[in-house]
Image (cartoon, helix red, strand yellow):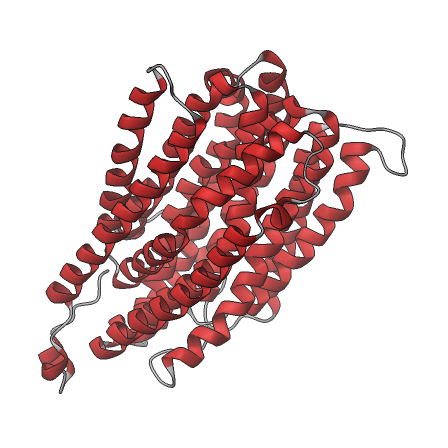
């Protein structure tokens, strides 16, 4: 366990962020490698895998419920020096992760094809996306366990083990992708099914590795079968913090679904280009997201300990670092968008859409960095309802005009990207205002921080 209530805030952020970003980048690289090999199967396969991957946002919504709830409550317990509560939260989160994984497997078997029919441009895309989802669902189900174990470690200030496990799992996935998708060395190509199978095998190995780490090396929180009996009070605590954050991911799923819906009339190449563009955009956003994710546990431990000044300092330092990073990435995306997209498809129309998407939507990056940091601070404070509110406003401000415009004569694909820029900056402004209000309600003014009693903090849960 690492005490984040002492020492340099910037030092903690810069120590925790690199392992986090390495772990996230390796996962994104794995997805891009899948798309790279699937691209050889044609536009329908790329569009199908990309659209099916959007379903991962919905599953990620459930993962965020557990992950955010686990991080916030364990970080607060660490700040209070309450190890017993931290262990209870961890073990109840493990129970919930198993239940959610089983629910994901069942839902995937029943809903994969109806989901693909609702958004795909043609039957070939429906078939490719459905096949990929059915083989990818075990990976999504097992990710719940990884999410909870990694979140528990991050709440205690430990990030390297999770990063190493993710890196090894991704290397395994990358090694398996050409073998299972294209039949390298075996002569038996499984196509899009191989992409899903490679991910499922890699995630299973990752779960086993993290389980071994907790059994042999982790000392602050650990598996305790005596605490696996369902305790509804603890579930309520986790859900109270996690559900709004999970709702945010569900709204991202809806936002992505709206884009795929309005792109249907532009054909499979447009959907494929958007799918590639979003993967690359997600990759280049990772450094700023990692900074934000590092800030969450720092804010959480200090909030639990009653250190209001360090909570404010964490936000200021994290948003400053994230903004500098996003400005640099924006310049790169505006200057050489093709450099970031090179090699993903030989189809000129698909790559033209991806390049146009990246050129326009990179104007969102600074705003998105602000949203990342605000969301992480809300998680650290244990109140994620403002996150859900800002995400809903963004979805509403985007979906209503873009769907209306898609029914009008003269509707162009550029309109999809323009509205994305406007709605994301609107969300950033609203998030900053909501966080300022949260600080004024839950943190005492800096001049009154002489004692914890005067700070007046009451840790959530």
Residue 214, percent from left and from top: 56, 64
Res 111 visible: yes
Residue 17, percent from left and from top: 49, 68
Would residue 261 appear left or right of 188 to someone viewing this image? left
Looking at the image, residue 164 lies above or below residue 139: below
Front one among 405 and 312:
405
Res 146 visible: no
Residue 128, percent from left and from top: 64, 22
Quadrant assignment, res 23:
bottom right
Residue at the spot 62% in from the left edge and 55% down from the top edge: 26
Looking at the image, residue 421 lies above or below residue 149: above
Residue 73, percent from left and from top: 32, 61
Looking at the image, residue 433 lies above or below residue 282: below
Would residue 424 appear left or right of 444 to someone viewing this image? right
Residue at the spot 38% in from the left edge and 84% down from the top edge: 8
Residue at the spot 35% in from the left edge and 14% down from the top edge: 409
């Amino acid at each position: 366990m690492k005490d984040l209530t002492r020492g340099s805030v910037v030092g903690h952020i810069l120590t925790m962020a690199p392992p986090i970003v390495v772990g996230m980048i390796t996962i994104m690289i794995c997805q891009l490698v899948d798309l790279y090999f699937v691209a050889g199967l044609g536009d329908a396969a790329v569009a199908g895998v990309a659209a099916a991957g959007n379903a991962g946002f919905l599953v990620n919504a459930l993962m965020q419920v557990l992950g955010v709830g686990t991080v916030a409550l364990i970080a607060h317990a660490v700040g209070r020096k309450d190890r017993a509560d931290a262990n209870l939260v961890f073990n109840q989160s493990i129970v919930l992760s198993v239940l959610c994984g089983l629910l994901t497997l069942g839902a995937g078997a029943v809903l994969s094809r109806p989901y693909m029919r609702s958004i795909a441009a043609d039957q070939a895309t429906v078939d490719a996306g459905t096949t990929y989802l059915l083989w990818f669902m075990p990976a999504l189900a097992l990710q719940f366990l990884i999410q909870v174990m990694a979140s528990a470690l991050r709440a205690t200030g430990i990030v390297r083990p999770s990063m190493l496990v993710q890196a090894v799992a991704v290397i395994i996935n990358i090694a398996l992708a050409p073998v299972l998708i294209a039949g390298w060395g075996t002569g038996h190509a499984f196509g899009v099914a191989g992409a899903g199978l490679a991910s499922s095998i890699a995630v299973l190995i990752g779960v086993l590795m993290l389980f071994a780490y907790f059994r042999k090396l982790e000392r602050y929180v650990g598996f305790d079968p005596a605490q696996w009996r369902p305790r509804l009070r603890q579930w309520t605590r986790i859900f109270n913090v996690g559900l709004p954050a999970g709702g945010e991911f569900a709204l991202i799923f809806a936002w992505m679904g709206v884009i795929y819906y309005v792109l249907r009339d532009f054909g499979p190449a447009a959907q494929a280009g958007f799918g590639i563009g979003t993967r690359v955009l997600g990759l280049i956003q990772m450094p700023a997201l990692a900074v934000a994710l590092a800030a969450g546990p720092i804010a959480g431990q200090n909030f639990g300990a009653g250190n209001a000044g360090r909570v404010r300092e964490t936000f200021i330092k994290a948003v400053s670092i994230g903004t500098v990073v996003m400005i640099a990435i924006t310049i790169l995306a505006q200057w050489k968008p093709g450099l970031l997209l090179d090699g993903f498809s030989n189809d000129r129309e698909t790559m033209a859409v991806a390049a146009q998407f990246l050129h326009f939507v990179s104007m969102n990056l600074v705003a998105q960095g602000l949203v990342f940091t605000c969301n992480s601070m809300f998680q650290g404070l244990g109140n994620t309802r403002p996150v859900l509110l800002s995400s809903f406003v963004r979805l509403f401000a985007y979906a209503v005009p873009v769907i209306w415009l898609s029914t009008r004569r003269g509707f162009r694909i550029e309109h999809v990207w323009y509205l994305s820029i406007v709605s994301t900056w609107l969300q950033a402004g609203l998030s900053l205002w909501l966080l300022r209000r949260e600080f004024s309600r839950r943190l005492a003014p800096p001049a009154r921080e002489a004692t914890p009693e005067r700070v007046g903090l009451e840790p959530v849960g």
